[in-house]
Amino acid sequence: MKIKRIALITPPYHAGVVESAGTWLNVGFVYIAGALRAAGYEVDYYDAMSLWHKWPDIQKRIEAFRPDMIATTAYTASVVEAVKLLRFAKSINPRIVTVLGNVHAAFCYDEVLTHDHDAVDYIVRGEGEETLPMLCHCLNAGDDPKKVLGIAYWRDGGVMVTPKAPYIHDLDNLPTAWDLVEWPIYTYRAKKNARLAIVSSSRGCKSQCSFCSQQLFWAQSWRARSAENFVAELEMLHNVHGVQVAMLSDELPTFDRQRWVRILDLMVEREVPVKLLMETRVDDILRDADIMDKYREGGVEHIYVGVEAGSQETLDLFKKDTEVAQSKQAIDLINGADIVSETSFVLGMPDDTPESIEQTIELAKHYNPDMAFFLAIAPWPYAELYPELEPYVATKDYRKYNLVEPVIKPKNMTMEELERQLGKASQKFFMHKFQNLDKLSPWKQEFMLSVLDLLINHSYLAGQMKAMLKEGKEMPAEVKALLKTVSQHKHVPHQTIAPIP
């Protein structure tokens, strides 16, 4: 069978984490769809996850498009659903060629193919824009897949692995397929359902965090688009597709200060009306202390910095290359520029206790970010830290590796105790924040009230947040009133729109 039509489908996995703030498109598919179209293939960009589609919906879409190949993507928590999706596709048409990509498959290809080679034909182990079209060309020519760099597959009772493909360095000239995106579903709830895009200005990470997958996936490399090319894309997304808010998918957008400053200057010069949400490192914020006002002028409204731990010992274990005091300084700088500050703390390490978690909560209050989330350590099986954590791994069900459900059992806590402590941590932190709402600027107060609505009605923290109603005796009257109002709203978990013809 010749491959002519390719469906890119996200697996229908939900954990209540990213969905709380909005609906996020798959920017990786935008690039891969663009590359496949440029190579002569017909493509369906199908975000089954964001559409909240069930299996009958997915079957209808597959049958309507009649793909010759289906490719999907998986981080660790979604890999079970991703494999299920590919097996489901083969039940519809056994001749469909199936492909799995992204970080989990890139490192755990041996495990996936050994157990699920009936469902997964090929794994792409790195960037897909060049590898996937090459694989399609190879299969259409009846050639040997071992000639395609950056893939793994099952042959003759074993796993075949080809050499790693080189990274793509010319990011400016990668084709995209923004026109295939089903735009009406992508909204940012915290900003009155503004149309939301996920964009990429760079690829890679130079950090060495021992618990993270990104420094492994990118081999501590970093490449970037030119400032002009990136800002022109933001302008196009606004003018053509009505985008009002864009979240940078970059691990480290600010790595090259000169380039980053040029981006901010162009945003101001061209008056680009797109607000930016982003993540970066604590030390880059400290480096940019003198230009934080430029961040705000350039449209940056929300910055996440990974604090991760409250003790220097744990920071060193995580190889964060930062000091505890620096995190407070960075958050102060973000707050000083009237930009929303967000951070997270990784809890549930083997030595954690209720007392150590309480200390972390107090430290979070001291740091004073606008938002702090307390996440369960997820022991990625390919991370540098995994051998140290493996003796404490309580489940190998990857669906639980979502930073919400505990996977590690601490030495002196049960899993149930840890889960309760994680919930209480968020409740205590946000109780503190809403008791001090009047200390924020007017626009931040409005933003935080929107966040409160999201936490109560759209997030995995809904139960803990609703408990604040009963315990919030010292909470300002307007916040108590809002709590009562938003807690009564009926949450509609998904929107539906007509599929692309």
Image (cartoon, helix red, strand yellow):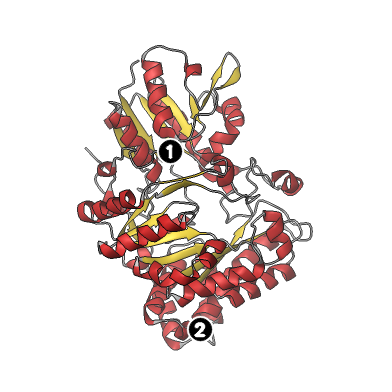
> Where residue 237 sits in the image (x, y, percent)?
26, 52
Q: Position of residue 346 (x, y in %)?
A: 63, 60
Q: Residue at x 67, y 54 (%)?
A: 319
Q: Which quarter shows the N terminus?
A: top left
- For image coordinates 29% across by 30% down, the residue present is 38
At 41% from the left and 81% from the top, the residue drawn is 441
**Marked residue nearer the N-terminal end (2 or 1):** 1
Labels 2, 1: front one: 1
Front residue of 368/173: it is 173
Q: Which residue occupies the extreme front position in the image? A: 258
Which quarter of the image is occupied by the C terminus? top left
Question: What residue is rendered at 61% in x and 18% in y?
Answer: 158
| Residue 318 position (above or below residue 489) | above
Residue type at numbered disc 2 = Asn
Determine whether, in the image, residue 4 is placed left or right of residue 448. left
Q: How busy is the neighbourhood of tag 2: few (under 14 within 10 Å), some, or many (20 plus)?
A: few
Estimate the x, y position of residue 410 in percent, counting from the top left: 74, 57
Q: Label 2 belongs to which residue?
A: 436
- Could you tell me which secondary element the residue under label 2 belongs to? loop
| Side of 229 where 367 appears, left or right | right
Q: Report helix, strand or loop for mark 1.
A: loop
Badge 1 is on which residue?
A: 169
Horizontal relation, residue 192 to residue 314: left or right: left
Q: Is residue 467 visible?
A: no
Residue 468 is left or right of residue 440, and the answer is: right
From the viewer's side, name the closer residue of 476 and 212.
212
Q: Amino acid at mark 1?
A: His
